[in-house]
Image: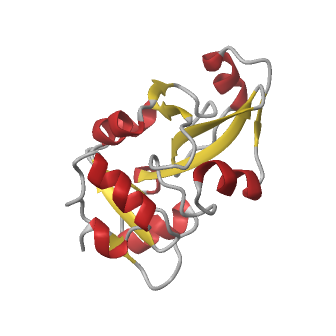
Amino acid sequence: MTASTSAHPRFAAALAERGLDGTEMRAFSEATRTAAQAAQALGCKLNQIVKSLVFEADKEPILVLMNGASRVDTELVRRELGAARVRRVDADTVRAVTGYAIGGVPPFGHVTALRTLADRGLLAHDTVWAAAGTAHTVFPLPPATLIAHAGAVPADVAEHGE
């Protein structure tokens, strides 16, 4: 499938703007809202799934791209950004700043330009999979390509021991 046939229309447009409109899409009849569901549906490792997570750093929405097997350490994010406080936001805020519902948030193509961090652990893989704007659709990219198109800054923000 091509991006135009299964990705969220806004995300398909974001792919086209980046010259990625021929990107492969995988669509599933069952939702893949969680990283575990996506990994199972794809038959890949959990840490090859990219979670696009929204936080607030000193009341500014930010995006953190994290592998599906790890959790974000908000203290590491706070230090990376030089913020006084970092906290996870609620589902309504996620939708308001990205234009997508939790479980379908892609790494770019949001309604708001978001400062973005990408955990360096993503770079350990040849290919990673991320949501394409819906809970039923994912797409693959080399992690360095995904990070570049997301305008993300690589950082070590996974909880220790992961």
In the image, residue 6 lies at what x, y percent? 36, 74
The residue depicted at 68 percent of the width and 53 percent of the height is: 96
In the image, residue 87 lies at what x, y percent? 77, 36
For residue 85, above or below residue 37: above
Q: Is residue 72 left or right of residue 132?
A: right
In the image, residue 98 lies at what x, y percent? 59, 51
Asked which colour scheme the image uses, the reply is secondary structure
The residue depicted at 35 percent of the width and 61 percent of the height is: 12
| Quadrant occupied by the C terminus | top right
Q: Quadrant of residue 159?
A: top right
Near-viewer residue (64 or 159): 64
For residue 4, above or below residue 10: below
Q: Is residue 54 visible?
A: yes
Near-viewer residue (78 or 10): 10
The residue depicted at 54 percent of the width and 38 percent of the height is: 113
Q: Is residue 132 visible?
A: no
